[in-house]
Amino acid sequence: MLRIGEFARLTRVSIRMLRHYDQVGLLRPARVDPATGYRYYRAAQLGRLNRILHLRDLGFGLAEIARTLDGDDATYRRREEELLAQLEATARQLTAVRARRTLRDDPDVVIRRVPAVRVATLVATPGIDVEPLFDALEVHVAEHGARADRPPMTLLDADSMTVAVPVTRSLPESALPGGHRVGLRNLPATTMACTVHNGPYAELAGHLERMRGWLAATGREPAGPLREVYLRFGADPGLRLPPTHVVDATDPGYVTELQLPVVALSGTGQR
């Protein structure tokens, strides 16, 4: 048998590590002298130690190594899934870095989870001035005492435009002057590409085009209606809106977040 120092020199594993493996039950000494406490190992234990070192190089933790040594093959599958997820994350980061390097006007898009929100809605004709619709909808929501302290938004797809005001509870569907009907929608939590624009609404179209260019460069494409979320907007003081998102004389700048559901193009490994 080999004393621990001899076994350490043979295996090139430190004495401290061998003692640690003993303490956690991965590699017990073949014998411990009861009088001196010296640890002794057999040369045949080198195979088990090599398996431990190999599994450690594969990124397994000590608890996972113990389960694997005990015959838990599911540990390999879990580690494979972890590595595949890391590969996908690295591929996404690499694609984003390349896009950032090559695009001259990167719009600073982030992919994030957007929480669910309940909104009162009015459907509008694309291209019309939506400010009167927002005013009418805000008045209607205020009359029912249901305004949530969250920013309003416009939902835009190819052939429709909907103004939306967050609410705290359900409202009765009803008609407003002009024939517009107030509806109610529950927008689910979802993953969105998001980018913030500071400035006039007239510049949003150009910002959206830069956003779409970034998505194409990073292997993604739109998968649903665009949301224009008005984080800072102007409003008639008479509407008595929650002050959180309304601009004032000391901070007159408009801030709008463009939110767009996206999916990965086939074969890109994006999510």
Image: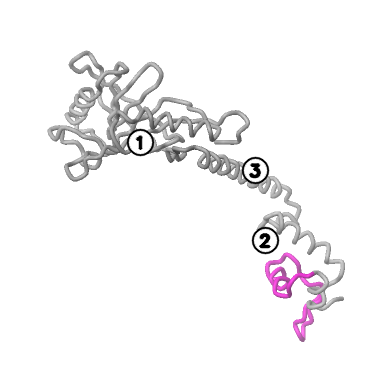
The single residue placed furthest to the bottom in the displayed view is 35
Which of 101 and 38 lies nearest the eye of the viewer?
Answer: 101
Mark in front: 1 vs 2: 1
Mark in front: 1 vs 3: 1
Quadrant containing the N terminus in the rendered view:
bottom right
Provide the residue span drawn in magenta.
Answer: 12-40
Which residue bears the numbered disc 2? 62
Secondary structure, mark 1, is strand
Eyeballing the image, is 96 above or below 66? Answer: above
Which residue bears the numbered disc 3? 84
Q: Amino acid at mark 2?
A: Leu
Q: Quadrant of residue 131?
A: top left
Q: Which mark is residue 257?
A: 1
Q: Quadrant of residue 130?
A: top left
- For residue 177, side relative to residue 7 (left or right): left
Quadrant containing the C terminus in the rendered view:
top right
